[in-house]
Image: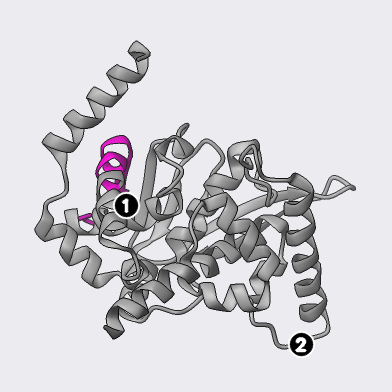
Amino acid sequence: MNIINWVKRQRIRYTLKRHSISYELWETVIDRTSLLHDLSSTEKAGLRELATLFLCQKTITGAQGLLVSDEMKVIIAAQAVLPVLELGLDYYNGWVEIILYPGAFRVSHGDVDQNGLVSSESHNLSGESWLRGPVILSWEDIEYELHAPHPGYNVVVHEFAHKLDMLNGRANGMPPLHPRMEIDQWTHALSVAFETLQQQVAHQHSTRINAYAATTPAEYFAVVSEYFFTAPDVLGKHCPDVYLQLTQFYRQNPVSRRKHKMMESAR
């Protein structure tokens, strides 16, 4: 065994033994987070280990005087590691901080047009991800989703999908694909669905996928990732090729997971 890998495994075992999320807190978080209810017992156990390691690698800092409790940290961590449940935490390397605001936060971005005119726009956001920088989240939005989950919407999954997208150097809807995935198939599936959604929005047609996804390819990837984990049946029905590509990228199949859970409940 490679000595570096051996040391890494020993460090992980030590962390899980000394800093593991308590069963009581973990069960409370699972109960409160409907996003995680379809997971099998084995998957929940794996998620708990990943969340433990995640909290040891990242810092969660409250902004504007917000006090961040252990339960809040675990709620965020559990949702953040769901996309990498079958990929591993190395996908979140290169940054360390999550900044948590009490509610939506206001940001200003400057822009320079072709004539050199400088303009500035301000927006209220529930989340933001920076390349090689922090993830910024609104606790109010996270907590609202716990009380009233909305299919196709999860701010934590959205922002961490952006982090995965940025692994190739920028957010463009093209995360680093696995060796056996075909780039042409990914590009065709997502670009066709993206352009179709743009046309629907342009002609003011009703859409089954949040219209915000039509903004940019990066936002499309983040939004369909939200649907993949929160409303996989909707994405699978209306964008089957996109759903197939995401099953290959995330190495998860939420539709099959949900069907299996329903069969278990019916017994």
Instruction: State the SS at label 1.
Output: helix
Tell me: 65 left or right of 180. Answer: left
Question: Coloured how?
Answer: one colour
Location of residue 206 by image quarter: bottom right
Q: Which residues are magenta?
A: 51-69
- The residue carrying mark 1 is 77
**Nearer-the-camera pick, 143 or 197:** 197
Q: Residue at x 66, y 68 (%)?
A: 213
Give coordinates of residue 103: x percent, y percent.
Answer: 38, 66
Q: Quadrant of the C terminus?
A: bottom left
Mark 2 sits on what residue?
Answer: 205
Q: Secondary structure at mark 2?
A: loop
Compare marks 2 and 1 and give the one earlier in the sequence.
Answer: 1
Q: Is residue 39 visible?
A: yes
Asked if residue 64 can be seen in this view, the reply is: no
Q: In terms of image quadrants, where is residue 261? A: bottom left
Say which of 37 and 145 sits in front: 37
Locate residue 257, reporting x and y percent. Answer: 42, 68
Query: Residue 175: x and y, percent?
Result: 63, 45
